[in-house]
Amino acid sequence: MIRIRDASLADFATFAAIAVDSEIGRRYGFEAASLETKMVAALASGAIFIVADDATKAMAEPGRENDAPGSDIAGFAWVDPKGAFGSSPYLKLIAVDSSIRSTGVGSALLAEFEKRTSGTGRPWLLLVSDFNTRAIAFYERHGYKEAGRLLDFAVQGVAEIIMIKPRPCSVRP
């Protein structure tokens, strides 16, 4: 069972560990300590961190200390509410614990991102690295479309795909 909540400062070490163990974390060489510092600074600057807790996650790992800080964190989303050109919600990162990927945690986080930012700005926007084919397919299944590419934007030799999802149009009489 997934429970969505806001982040607390005690969560950021776990966020960093999850992100380091992700496809993008491995490819880009994320380091837990510096990533944790960046995320805490982003929170202080107005970023939103959405947490997905999973009570079944701890049960799936025998011997795991269930009440350790972060032990039930299944994943998180890092959101800049107006980070896309100062006018649209920007999803900076979704990361899910590697032991429970493809179980709906990412979908729950993405839905919460859209829900929380539904009244802000224009289309939802995110970047996804061209090598991350699973993430590209995930976002396409959720209605995101490629809007362009930024060559060598984050790392030389990698294109960041700009993906947007338009807001539902309301029909006017």
Image (cartoon, helix red, strand yellow):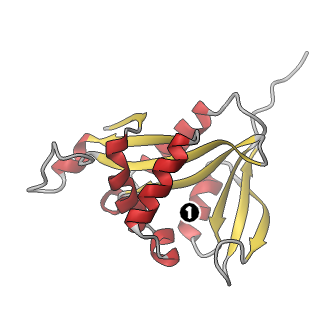
Residue 153, position in %: x, y? Answer: 71, 72
**Which image quarter: residue 81?**
top right
| Label 1 environment density (alpha carbons within 10 Å; few <14, some 14–19, many ≥20) | some
| Residue occupying the point 16% across, 56% down | 61
Is 127 left or right of 71, judged from the image as shown?
right
Is 2 left or right of 130, judged from the image as shown?
left
Q: Which residue is mark 1?
A: 135
| Residue occupying the point 58% across, 31% down | 116
Residue 59, position in %: x, y? Answer: 16, 48
Residue furthest to the bottom: 157
| Residue occupying the point 31% across, 44% down | 10
* Quarter in which the C terminus is drawn: top right
| Residue occupying the point 51% across, 49% down | 41
* Quarter in which the N terminus is drawn: top left
**Which image quarter: residue 123?**
top right
Residue furthest to the right: 173
| Residue 111 in sight in this render | no
**Which image quarter: residue 22?**
bottom left
Residue furthest to the left: 63
| Residue 69 in sight in this render | yes
Give above or below for 170 relative to 138.
above
Residue 44, position in %: x, y? Answer: 52, 41
Residue 83, position in %: x, y? Answer: 69, 47
